[in-house]
Amino acid sequence: MRTSTRRSHRMTALAAVAVMATGLLAGCASDDDSSSGSDNGGGNGGGKTTLTIGTFGTFGYKQAGLYDEYMKLHPEITIKENVTTRTDVYWPKVLTRLQAGSGTDDVQAIEIGNITEAVQTQADKFVDLGAQVDKSQWLDWKNAQATTKDGKLIGLGTDIGPMAICYRKDLFQKAGLETDRNKLAELWKGDWAKYVDLGKKYMEKAPSGTKFVDSASSVYNAALGGAKDRYYDADGNVIWDKSEGVKKAWDVAMTVATSDMSAKLKQFDKPWDQGFANAKFATVACPAWMVGYIQEKSGDAGKGNWDVAAAPTAANWGGSFLGVPKASKHQKEAIELAKWLTAPEQQAKVFAKQASFPSTPAAYSSLKPSPDTLAYFSDAPLTQIYSDSAKTIPSQIFGIKDQPINTALTDVGILQVEQKGKSPEQGWKAATEEIKDVLGQ
Amino acid sequence: MTGSKQALAQPASSAGAAPGKQPGAARRAHGRGRPASGGSPWRSRLYRWDMKASPYAFITPFFVIFGAFSLVPLLYTAWYSLHHVQLSSLDHQTWAGLDNYENLLSSDFFWNALKNTFTIGVISTVPQLAAAIWLAHMLNYRLRGSTVWRVVMLTPYATSVAAATLVFTLLFAPDNGMVNWVLDALGMDPVNWRESDWGSQLAVSSIVIWRWTGYNALIYLAAMQAIPADLYESAALDGATRWQQFRHVTIPMLRPTILFTVVVSTIGATQLFGEPLLFGGVSGTKGGSEHQYQTLGLYMYDQGWIVGNLGKASAIAWSMFLILLIIAAINLLISRRLRKS
């Protein structure tokens, strides 16, 4: 009796191990299926279809209630959003899954820093959306960034990052500076160097504990966002060290880094967030998406103290696209969803929620920021400032390694000068070495 | 394994033959006694098959998983390291021979990362183990609520790297961090902990020390409690002080344990990754603007996933593996030497 129970115990254990082992292996296999959205059982025939959308950061679709709205319009669709906070974690994952041909989401968001890499290396992994949409809805330069050499459109524009300057009126006043947004815009119009000059004036009478700007890197990114040439030429050659745009942006950033006007904070770091809350700096280069960020981080204390003025030059910083991987099992439905989410009406709704600026000019006339946001930014004409900037942004050329090259300049070159007291020449040299390493030279 | 063999060899050995001495063998012998002596040949064959194959079946899951998630990737990484491969075009590989390795040997970034890994390793491991021995020695005395102390020691180890690093990042914040606040109170200049060369390494090391000291202390404590009390008694009879007892009894008896913790800590230090990454915040893979705390692990991650040079990243991975092999060899030599003496 005892023997047989023992044996059966052993057999059970063995069976359990076997089941677990196969379960593990099967788990790997079925995982891919479920994340590409085929775990709904029904497929297209009458049952519910689950569409997954992969995003990073805060796209605002969920916050603006767009998923719920779409599911109400299309009762047969269920939408699931897979969010990864950071792009530098999100993008490598997407790249490997695209190439493996499985595990991708039905709709995949692509950041502007990665769009060129996607266009040049992953175009055959994405559905050509060009024939599916009216391309004239979007700004030309936005479409151009997601279009391959042979004319395939692999991503639909979501938001863009037209530039403005956000500044604290209260601090400007204490420093004895002009506080009117139109006069300020006039003061620094055309040249970021003029903006930096104002910084010198600010520092002469700066309220204690405050600086003019958050970091030299933010000035660099803003200035570069309005330059025609960046790191690559039209043929895909790296020209960063000869680029006029880079040189100019670098020089402005160096003026900031070698002066005392920078709070020396690294953007998107905790101390930077705290800097907003404690009013450590008076201005920040302010692409449209920054508006929501400031509101969140600066909190109630900042309400009514912030204002927005037009930037020295029209510039773009940031923005994204939605693409549909060919690996999606519900391409048709996914395309419909991507089209709907990027349509002017929906982009306007996201703007109303978190001020992500639409890439579709048709939306501009109807843009209404939320009353909260308006009150927060002293009733600045946000729509007008940003749409004026958006319409005059030059078409820029991006390259495959745009992102790491930019990081090398901001987080190695500029940071060394700003925080470690190196000379601008040393900073430039360090960035050069870094970029060589990035390019594998 | 030995247990079951014994059981096979002596199927009839009575259950009472070795009670307590080898509980496993005894129980098996007892349980298995009948089917072997009586029953059909089929059953006995099944039984023998069971005895032979089951152990392997039991260890198979580990090896299947190890093979799928460790061995294959390991070999594939070696293959990658001999090619030029970009993350964005994995299928487009061109043979590079030892290019990637040569590139590393001539790269300042690689040597810098190796140097950082070494210095951070030393700064974190040495104080950590020294403090652990001291703490274990203290805990080895009769203490009130000793369990409480031991649990407290283990809590940092149970904290996640992310949570611990987040707190330390706040402590070391240049503007309003507590460490600078204390320095200020002591009349010293504040340190930009993230960008200063030695400051950043100290800060990263402090996270490692905080997390692992308690863990090592518990290991030492376990070893200390296995030291026979009569050794101390006779030492005390010979007039040895507490310190002499510690030096001449405790430390020699702990030698194998110390060696073990040194090896484990060294491996941990070589692979150091999470702490400096999270300490760096945005673009933490650079390990500071001058790569002042970029470890090999960070450099590998930066090359592979941020920059996208998978071939080079694989070469770094294999270099790390080789470094670990060298460390293991040195360790083997030392332990042999120790055993002889």
Image (spheres, coloured by chain):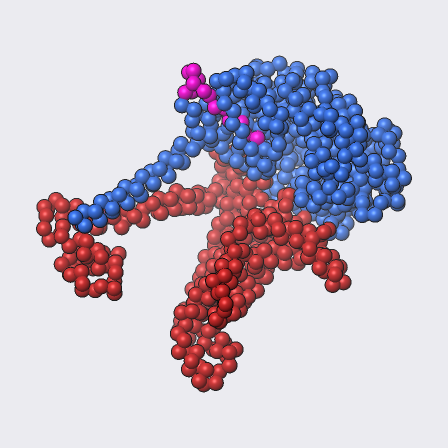
Chain colours: A blue, B red
**Who's the residue at 53% across and 20% down the image?**
A71
**Magenta span of residues:** A42-55
Q: Quadrant of residue A117?
A: top right
Q: Position of residue A13 (x, y in %)?
A: 28, 45
**Who's the residue at 76% across and 63% down the image?**
B187
Q: Quadrant of residue A316?
A: top right
| Residue A52, magenta (yes or no) | yes
**Who's the residue at 42% across and 69% down the image?**
B225
Q: Position of residue A31 (x, y in %)?
A: 43, 33
Q: Position of residue B126 (x, y in %)?
A: 55, 64
Which residue is at the front of the view, A392 or A56? A56
Q: Position of residue B304 (x, y in %)?
A: 54, 42
For the question of whether residue A150 can be seen, the reply is no
| Residue A58, magenta (yes or no) | no
Task: Report how many numbered discs are placed on residues in the image.
Answer: 0
Residue A333 vertical position relative to residue B151 in the rendered view, above or below: above
Residue A66 vertical position relative to residue B64 in the rendered view, above or below: above
* Residue sitting farthest toward the bottom: B238
Residue B171 vertical position relative to residue A162 in the rendered view, above or below: below
Q: Quadrant of residue A291?
A: top right
Residue B318 vertical position relative to residue A160 in the rendered view, above or below: below
The C terminus of chain A - image quarter: top right
* Residue sitting farthest toward the right: A176
* Residue sitting farthest toward the front: B144
